[in-house]
Amino acid sequence: MGFKLTIKKFDEQLEILRQEYKVYAPVMIKGKGTFADTNTIRYKEIESIKQVEFDLKSTFSPKEIILPITQTLFYFTENDCEQPKQEEKKILIFLRSCDIHAMKRLDEVYLENGDEDYYYKTLRDKVKFVLMGCTESFENCFCASMGSNKTEDYDMYTKVQDDEVFVNCKSEELMNYFKIDECEETQVEPEFVLNNEIKVTIPENLDQRIFKSKMWDEYSARCIACGRCNFVCGTCTCFTMQDIFYKENKNVGERRRVWASCHVDGYSDMAGGHGFRKSKGDRMRFKVMHKVYDFKKRAGYHMCIGCGRCDDICPEYISFSNCVNKLNKAMDEVE
């Protein structure tokens, strides 16, 4: 159903919805950017649609809402284990088409890849999506090449224009929060980007022969193993486990799941001092092949969604899209 209402009326009904939902959206955070006196756009809980940053791409993905950076799995004592108290409210997330596709990738890893992950599913079952349209492509985006520029998997679509909010709501549950007599019915269709300046082509003959290519040597020289590309990526899912012991009693503490990165030193270390992928080029190869080769062989679609955040954040100006395009020439050379 499509309708429009004023920002004031939308916020009034959003306030009612917030009694049962925690509402998250990309928000401009002043002075918290990578460099001094710069800003960042990150997902935060909102109280008004006026806080939502519709015009710029978020620096970080919404994945941290349902896959927290640090998540306590349980508390332990000398004699017992206890799970943390669960948040009773449901979750509503404002996000773009590419990020909805990213959630599908997370679901594939945590819900379809063997037994369901209990901790992920507990949060995921609470989530509803509010689609944010894209009127034009952002810098470094290549979502059209990855097929993530369009989606129908949303519960509600919103667009702010002047002092009005245009809404297309597919969820009966969410519709219950709107007073239809205060809304004006109108045609509302999501806006999707059809083309990006950046085009990415993945070679059809891509296989493990690419492992021996010299193209990876460049990244051993350039990459500094900071892991930023992994942490802003909407589809990176790796984590490590930490047991935290309290100073007051070293037999009491908690087990946490914490994000990890295949680019960071120590990620693949093993007992006895052995480690896989010690060179940064090998780590880049592992990430690239996972995003555009390994995952597809299992799931039938590519892991990368073409959001371009990895290119945006890299301090060494390494471009993931350029790297993928280089695979074409590299495969010709290994034949």
Image: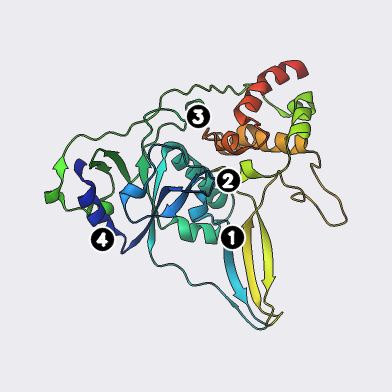
Instruction: Tell me where residue 35 appears, x and y as whole percent.
Output: 59, 43
- Near mark 4 (Cα within 10 A), the count class, few <14, some 14-19 or many ≥20, is few
Instruction: Tell me where residue 313 appears, x and y as whole percent.
Output: 59, 39
How far apart in space, not on screen, are marks 2 and 1 (Cα)? 26 Å
In the picture, measured across the screen, residue 170 lies left or right of residue 143, that is left
* SS at badge 3: loop
Instruction: Tell me where residue 330 appears, x and y as whole percent.
Output: 72, 20
Q: Residue at x 64, y 68 (%)?
A: 255
Choose the circle earlier in sequence order: 4 or 3.
Answer: 4
Quadrant showing the C terminus: top right
Q: Contact (CB < 8 A) between labels 1 and 3?
A: no
Quadrant showing the N terminus: top left
Choose the circle earlier in sequence order: 1 or 4.
Answer: 4
How far apart in space, not on screen, are marks 2 and 3 (Cα)? 22 Å
Instruction: Tell me which corner region of the image, top left, top right, bottom left or bottom right, holds residue 169.
Output: top left
Q: Residue at x 33, y 31 (%)?
A: 191
